[in-house]
């Protein structure tokens, strides 16, 4: 999900795939069942935002000479919101894992 963020348009398929892998891993793990609904929502937000971004790009984009209002950009908002939710969750999971490994036995 971080690699795809280098270029949000071209990297969006990588971000969707990465989020799908995390969601699948959460589904298959025994520990992460409580987070499954969260990751499904993150995946849906990212997929809807990326889909809207590709559709808007196919129709000439927004603003400027495209003839489409900048308000159409609101359809893309779920993409960065879902991405941020996913990154925050992964960072919290990483911190929790590092603290658990550093705990004295």
Image (spheres, rainbow, N blue to C red):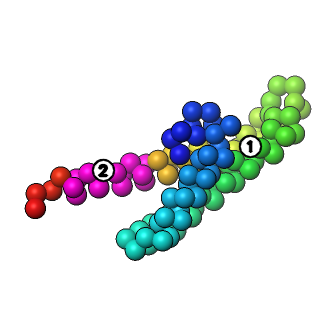
**Number of other residues with Cα within 10 Å of mark 1, as a class: few under 14, some 14 to 19, many 20 or more:** many
Tell me the element at label 1. Answer: helix
What are the residue bounds of the magenta stretch? Answer: 88-101
The residue that mark 1 highlights is 53
The x, y position of residue 47, in whole percent, is: 67, 54
Which quadrant holds residue 48? bottom right
Q: Is residue 81 visible?
A: no
71 and 39: which is toward the camera: 39
**Is residue 2 shown above or below 100?**
above
Residue in the picture at 77% in, 35% down: 70
The x, y position of residue 51, in whole percent, is: 74, 50
- Most common secondary structure along the magenta stretch: helix
Quadrant of the drawing holding the C terminus: bottom left
Residue in the picture at 80% in, 38% down: 57
**Is residue 25 shown above or below 45?**
below
Tell me the element at label 2. Answer: helix
The x, y position of residue 59, in whole percent, is: 87, 39
Q: Is residue 11 magenta?
A: no
**Is residue 55 shown above or below 29?**
above
The x, y position of residue 49, in whole percent, is: 68, 49
Q: Is residue 98 magenta?
A: yes
The residue that mark 2 highlights is 95
């Amino acid at each position: 999900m971080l690699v795809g963020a280098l270029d949000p348009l071209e990297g969006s398929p990588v971000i969707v795939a990465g989020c799908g892998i995390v969601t699948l891993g959460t589904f298959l793990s025994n520990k992460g069942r409580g987070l499954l609904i969260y990751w499904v929502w993150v995946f849906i937000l990212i997929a809807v935002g990326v889909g809207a971004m590709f559709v808007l790009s196919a129709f000439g984009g927004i603003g400027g000479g495209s003839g489409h209002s900048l308000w159409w950009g609101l359809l893309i908002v779920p993409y960065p919101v879902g991405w941020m939710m996913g990154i925050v969750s992964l960072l919290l999971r990483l911190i929790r894992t590092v603290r658990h490994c550093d705990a004295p036995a």
